Amino acid sequence: MLHVQDVSLAFGKQQILDDVSFTLAKGEVGLLIGQNGTGKSTLLRCIAGWSQSESGTVTINGQTRKQNQRMYYKQFIFVPDTPDFYDSLSLWEHCQFIARMHNVADWQTTSESLLQHFALQEHKDSFPFMLSRGMRYKLGITLALLVSPPLLLLDEPFGPLDAVACAWLWERLRGYAQTDKTVLLSTHTLPEGQLPDYIFHIHNKTLKLVPPEQNQSLSDLLDEN
């Protein structure tokens, strides 16, 4: 599904990522961890095509940007840590607009359910600029789940969410992956007692796989030098 091979990226003279490689299959949830500034968001943006790597390839469902850019971008939705919206459209109009763009059937029912679970239902006629950061992120995830792409990329999804929303989102992401989809997210925290299929630790510009079964907290991993 997602195959990252020998990806390197620098901003000017500062090397951010150096020969990063990993793979995620359908049905799997992967977690990117690392201290602030180590390149988690940069890697997600590179996969999403928002940042250009110096070398290496990213393949999603057999597609690369060089081979077929249109098909490549159809394979995923990326929700950054501060998603942007159309301030002239209400939450409900965003759902309608995105559903029509992606030919989503029965979008009303799905949108109602997602907005309800994220406690956004009573705000569906509000505009994004009226929402808190956490509520705006909930809207971003709502729109991503409405489209239901093969690959879901989330940058720090749990940070701005309350405990109830975090628990529900993790359960939803697990269920999402079980429908032959793939999830890659960056975070410093997880709902208590939950583990992804793979933990990818970015440290010193490189990435290493950490077996999730290791009895080690994310904070302990981040403290490693």
Image: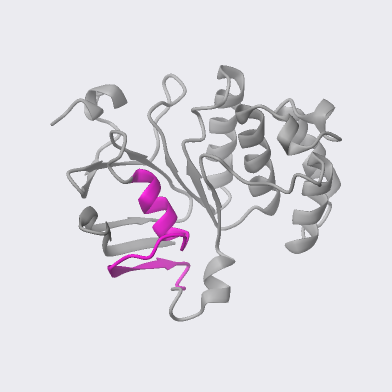
Visual colour scheme = one colour
Quadrant, the N terminus = bottom left
* Magenta-drawn stretch contains 42: yes
Hey, which residue is sitting farthest front in the picture?
A: 12
Q: Residue at x 22, y 53 (%)?
A: 14
Taking the image as shown, residue 214 lies to the left or right of residue 89, namely left
- Seen as rendered, the residue at the extreme left is 225
Q: Quadrant of residue 116?
A: top right
Name the quadrant containing residue 70: bottom right
Q: How many marks?
A: 0
- Position of the C terminus, as image quadrant, is top left
179 vs 139, nearest the viewer: 139
Q: Residue at x 20, y 25 (%)?
A: 223
Residue closest to the eye, 86 or 102: 86
Residue 200 percent coordinates (x, y): 29, 43
Q: Is residue 103 visible?
A: no
x and y, in percent, of residue 29 in the image:
44, 44
Residues drawn in magenta: 40-63
Residue drawn at x 70%, y 48% as measured from the top left: 146
Taking the image as shown, residue 41 lies to the left or right of residue 12, namely right
Viewed as shown, does residue 107 lie left or right of 217?
A: right
Image position of 171 with respect to 6: above or below: above
Whether residue 167 is situated above or below residue 43 in the rendered picture: above
Q: Tell me, yes or no, if residue 147 can be seen here.
A: yes
Choose between 122 and 130: the one closer to the eye.
130
Q: Is residue 57 magenta?
A: yes
Query: Residue 214: percent from the left, percent from the top?
Result: 24, 29
Rendered location of residue 17, percent (x, y): 25, 54
